[in-house]
Structures are given as structure tokens and as C-alpha cells.
Image (cartoon, helix red, strand yellow):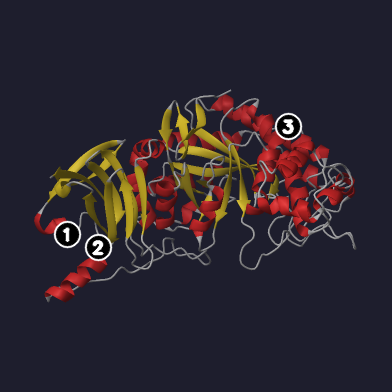
């Protein structure tokens, strides 16, 4: 058992505590197959360290962990823990069990070959088809599947508890992007039995009271006649919305059962991640995995999976901030397990949503020296500084869109934040100074790859402001200018000091004055400085 790693709520969100110290996670998830061999674990984790990560997400695959039923192989998880520990990285273990991206390709051969014991999902009531073409899909309604998954996961967590003496493993993701594609619900015999059964009391109470259930789910109940009891079709209706609620309850119960089997041995935060839905081109459940922790059924998941610490969005869409708004709730800390390499989004998650961590997908694809690794060079060395500021409400995010300035407040102190390059360009134009200005040029954040999700360095000005005392601030940012003002006092800048963090300690560099006061942090790269103000009447 391990109770020294936990999630603790605070006024602005939640913190990940390790031995009582708030920590923030800055890193990435290695590719699905990168933890399937010892050599690949060493290579990809080492690459993550070169990119300045302080943690990695790596998968533990059921098909390799239990090749033969009842026989468990700890070779790969042992290597993951040892390699991460040697590199000074924290590790989040991703359990690829019965479900990965709405398919079951990581279930062992002995599971997939026994369709009587472990039946397939059926996505079409008319023709009895069992998959939508992307691989085997086991039915979440199979009690035998749940027991097998629980047993393997429990052994995996017991193995980690016995191996990990340095608290290298700090969280666990249970399954991956669960749900059913190709249909809004499963039509196998076991699913039909449940569909014809009574709706659980917890859901009925939420519907009738309106407490603990979102408007989207409750509207399906209202449309079906607001019945206080009955079968699923009676209570939620035979629509895709009703089907998704039904599937969400059983997927949540499944994942919760797997998590509970692991917590008996390793009591650390566990979570589930979501394939987003609805999104452009995906307008009804089944186009995204029906029953997964999508935005439409978050409250159903909260009811069905109370052992999970949070539900996390995998964000590949352009409008990342809208998804962060949905998943960051008083009852749900924000953690991003998969995302594009878009640096400004990471700063927004950390500063505005007090995210406990941020992870790009395909960690080893990152180009050493890219923008995200510049950011992590500062943040990973100051993760406790950042996390403490989050917990105490002393942090603000900067992300300027379309050249529009931003204003943040710390008490009566106002900070107007603007684009430093745009400001200098305007000054040059007005003053008539002969100065050559070079605009920011976005480049790929990734190595040269034959195929990749577009991930360009972020041209937007972005960063974090942390208040260290009433008149002292830490700025980690790119391309911003700050203007301070306060009601009743005149404010001027007393001192600006460049520097960086090493092991949570500030290491000062240049004192900025004169011309260098025009840009406290670089316009096109990420820098850090401490600012001391002078207030007078």
C-alpha cells in the first residue's frame, strides 16, 4: 500500500502531493509500443530526459504481462521503473487492459480466442456484426472479462508496490479511451439482459433530484417521460443519448472495478482518459466511443467510478481551452495525458486551471531543443514552486490570442500584459528608429517523421506569473510585456533579475536595466525573471 501520494483539493483546483509536497508533472506519453521491449524503454525514456521532462507515461500491456492465464511476467514493468528512477523521472503507468481506443487488441490471445467465455460486443442488432473494422472488441458486459482484467491489474499493482521503493510511480491510468465505436450501444446477449433490467438507484436518484447529474443526461430522462423507475429503455429512452448513458454506467463500473482491484495493493491516484466527444464530424455517440468519459456523460462516470481520482481529456482538437473548461471542475482536477506539442496550451492548463500535469503524446518524437523542451527546462526544475503557487492561488496564466492584451489581478494590483514584439514594432514605427525586426517563425516541434500530427512551435505570447510576495513576482514566459498599476498607489519597477531554477532553487543571472528593460523575457524564446516593484504615494 502507498498512501503518501494523493490528490488534495484547494481553492483553485487540486494538487498532486508526494510526501506532503505539491508537485506538478511536465512530460509526455511515449508511443504505445515503446514499452514493449527493454531496449525501447531505455531509449525512449532517455529521450524524454533530454527533452527536460520530469515524468513519462508508459504503458503496461496485458497481452505481455499475462501471456498465459495465471502466469505473470514483470520484466517490462521492472525495467520501466528502474529506468525512470535512474533518470530521475516520475512514471505514470498506463494499463492497456481489455480496452484501448475502443478496441481490445491488448487483451491476451487466451482471452480473445475464447468467445464463449469472453464474448465480443455486437454493434448491429440487425445483422449481429461484432466490430466496426478496427480490431477485436470485447463486451464490457462480460463478468468473466472483468474478473480476468481485475486479476491481472491487481497482480500488476502488487508488483509495482513491491518493486517501487523510491515512489517513482505516482499515478496509474486504468484502460485507455474506453467505449464502443460503430454503434451507440452494445447488442450482445449480455448487454440485452442489462438493457432490459432496472436502472440503478444511484442514477434514478440523480435524475429525480437533479443533483449530481448534468443537464445533457437528465434531458434524456425528461424526454423519456421523467419516470422514477423502470428499465433502461423506460427511463432514458431508445435514443443514442439514452444508449450512451447506459454504456457509460457499465464502462464506469468496469473501470472502477479494475481500479479497486489495484488499490488493494497500491493506493495511489488512478484515472481514466477520454476520446473527446462530441467534436467536429462526430455528433452522436458511437462516432466517438459510446460510454467513454466524454463531456456528455461525465456525471454518469462520477457516479459509476468513485474510486477514480479524476477523468482526463485527450486533447487533439484546435480549441483546447474549451475542453479544459469542461473537464476542470470542483470535483475533477485537470490532468492532460495526451495532447499535441502546443506550448501555450500547456501554460494555460497549468496557470489558469491549476492542472496537476501536462503530457504530449509521442514523447520520443519531440525535437531536442524545441519550444516545449525550453519551457520544461524552466518548469520541471520548479515544479514544486509552481504547484505551491497553484494551491495558494498565487499564479496566473498568459496566453494572448490575436494580439489582444490581457489583464490579471493579484489583490488590488493590476497587471496589463501585452505582446512585446507588437509593442516594439509600434515603437519603431512611431519613433522612426532604423531597427530590423524579425517576426517569430514557427517550426515543427517534432523530429522529421514520415507522418505526424501537426505540432508547430507556438507563435502566441504565453507564460506564467507567480506572486512571491506583495510586490515581488516570478515571470516564466515568451514575448510579453507587463505593465503594473494599483488603486491608491503609484507603481514602478524597482528591479528585474534574469535567472533560472535548479532543483526548485532560483539561480540568478543578469540584472536587467536600461535598454534590456524593454524586454524582460525574450520575444521568441522562453525565459524567466524575477520582478520587484516599488509602491509609493
Residue contact at pointers 1 and 2, CB within 8 angstroms: yes
Q: Which mark is residue 420?
A: 2
Q: Quadrant of the C terminus?
A: top left
Residue assigned mark 1: 518
Q: Earlier in the sequence, mark 3 or mark 1?
A: 3
Q: Horizontal and vertical percent for residue 345? A: 44, 56
Q: Secondary structure at mark 2?
A: helix
State which quarter of the image contains the N terminus.
Answer: top right
- CB within 8 Å, label 3 to label 1: no
Q: Residue furthest left?
A: 514
Give the secondary structure at mark 1.
helix
Picture residue at 83% right of the left edge, 44% below the top: 118
In the image, taking residue 466 as reference, residue 78 lies left or right, namely right
Is 453 on the left or on the right of 420, as rendered? right
- Numbered circle sitting on residue 151: 3
Say which of marks 3 and 2 sits in front. 2
Image location (x, y in percent) of residue 380: 37, 42
Is 100 situated above or below 148? below
Marks 1 and 2, Cα distance to the nearest angstrom?
Answer: 8 Å
Q: Position of residue 253 (x, y in %)?
A: 73, 39
Q: Secondary structure at mark 3?
A: helix
Could you tell whether 310 is left or right of 494 in the image?
right
Q: CA distance from mark 3 to mark 1?
A: 61 Å
Q: Earlier in the sequence, mark 1 or mark 2?
A: 2
Marks 3/2: CA–CA distance? 57 Å
At horizontal 51% and vertical 45% (from top left) the residue drawn is 335
Q: Nearer the viewer, residue 487 or 139?
A: 487
Amino acid at each position: 500500500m502507498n498512501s503518501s501520494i494523493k490528490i488534495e483539493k484547494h481553492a483553485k483546483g487540486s494538487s498532486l502531493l508526494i510526501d506532503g509536497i505539491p508537485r506538478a508533472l511536465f512530460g509526455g506519453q511515449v508511443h504505445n509500443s515503446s514499452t514493449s521491449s527493454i531496449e525501447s524503454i531505455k531509449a525512449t525514456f532517455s529521450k524524454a530526459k533530454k527533452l527536460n521532462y520530469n515524468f513519462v507515461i508508459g504503458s503496461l500491456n496485458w497481452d505481455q504481462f499475462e501471456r498465459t492465464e495465471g502466469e505473470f511476467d514483470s520484466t517490462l514493468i521492472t525495467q520501466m521503473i528502474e529506468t525512470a528512477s535512474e533518470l530521475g523521472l516520475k512514471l505514470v503507468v498506463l494499463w492497456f487492459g481489455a480496452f484501448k481506443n475502443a478496441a481490445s487488441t491488448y487483451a491476451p490471445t487466451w482471452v480473445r480466442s475464447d468467445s464463449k467465455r469472453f464474448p465480443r460486443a455486437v454493434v448491429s442488432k440487425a445483422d449481429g456484426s461484432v466490430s466496426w473494422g478496427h480490431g477485436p472488441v470485447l463486451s464490457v458486459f462480460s463478468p468473466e472479462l472483468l474478473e480476468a482484467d481485475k486479476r491481472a491489474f491487481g497482480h500488476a499493482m502488487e508488483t509495482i508496490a513491491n518493486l517501487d521503493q523510491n515512489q517513482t510511480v505516482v499515478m496509474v491510468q486504468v484502460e485507455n479511451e474506453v467505449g464502443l465505436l460503430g454503434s451507440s450501444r452494445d447488442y450482445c446477449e449480455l448487454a440485452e439482459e442489462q438493457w432490459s433490467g432496472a436502472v440503478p438507484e444511484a442514477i434514478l436518484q440523480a435524475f429525480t433530484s437533479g443533483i449530481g447529474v448534468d443537464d445533457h443526461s437528465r434531458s434524456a430522462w425528461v424526454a423519456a417521460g421523467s419516470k422514477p423507475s423502470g428499465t433502461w429503455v423506460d427511463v432514458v429512452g431508445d435514443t443514442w443519448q439514452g444508449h450512451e448513458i447506459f454504456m457509460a454506467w457499465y464502462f464506469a463500473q468496469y473501470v472502477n472495478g479494475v481500479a479497486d482491484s489495484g488499490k488493494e495493493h497500491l493506493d495511489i491516484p488512478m484515472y481514466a482518459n477520454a476520446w473527446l466527444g462530441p467534436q467536429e464530424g462526430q455528433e452522436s455517440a458511437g462516432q466517438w466511443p459510446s460510454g467513454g468519459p466524454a463531456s456528455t456523460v461525465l456525471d454518469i462516470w462520477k457516479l459509476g467510478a468513485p474510486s477514480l481520482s479524476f477523468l482526463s481529456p485527450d486533447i487533439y482538437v484546435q480549441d483546447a481551452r474549451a475542453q479544459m473548461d469542461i473537464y476542470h471542475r470542483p470535483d475533477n482536477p485537470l490532468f492532460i495525458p495526451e495532447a499535441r506539442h502546443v506550448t501555450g496550451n500547456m501554460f494555460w492548463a497549468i496557470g489558469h486551471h491549476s492542472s496537476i500535469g501536462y503530457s504530449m503524446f509521442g514523447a520520443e518524437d519531440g525535437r531536442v531543443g524545441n519550444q516545449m523542451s525550453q519551457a520544461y527546462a524552466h518548469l520541471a526544475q520548479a515544479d514544486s514552486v509552481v504547484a505551491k503557487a497553484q494551491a495558494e492561488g498565487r499564479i496566473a496564466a498568459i496566453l494572448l490570442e490575436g494580439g489582444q492584451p490581457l489583464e490579471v489581478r493579484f489583490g488590488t494590483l493590476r497587471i496589463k500584459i501585452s505582446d512585446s514584439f507588437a509593442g516594439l514594432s509600434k515603437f519603431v514605427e512611431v519613433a522612426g528608429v532604423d531597427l530590423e525586426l524579425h517576426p517569430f517563425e514557427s517550426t515543427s516541434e517534432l523530429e522529421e517523421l514520415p507522418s505526424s500530427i501537426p505540432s508547430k512551435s507556438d507563435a502566441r505570447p504565453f507564460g506564467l506569473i507567480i506572486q512571491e510576495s506583495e510586490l515581488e513576482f516570478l515571470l516564466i514566459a515568451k514575448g510579453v510585456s507587463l505593465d503594473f498599476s494599483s488603486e491608491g498607489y503609484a507603481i514602478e519597477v524597482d528591479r528585474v533579475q534574469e535567472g533560472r531554477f535548479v532543483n526548485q532553487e532560483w539561480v540568478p543571472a543578469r540584472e536587467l536595466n536600461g535598454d534590456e528593460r524593454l524586454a524582460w523575457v525574450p520575444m521568441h524564446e522562453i525565459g524567466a525573471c524575477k520582478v520587484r516593484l516599488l509602491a509609493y504615494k
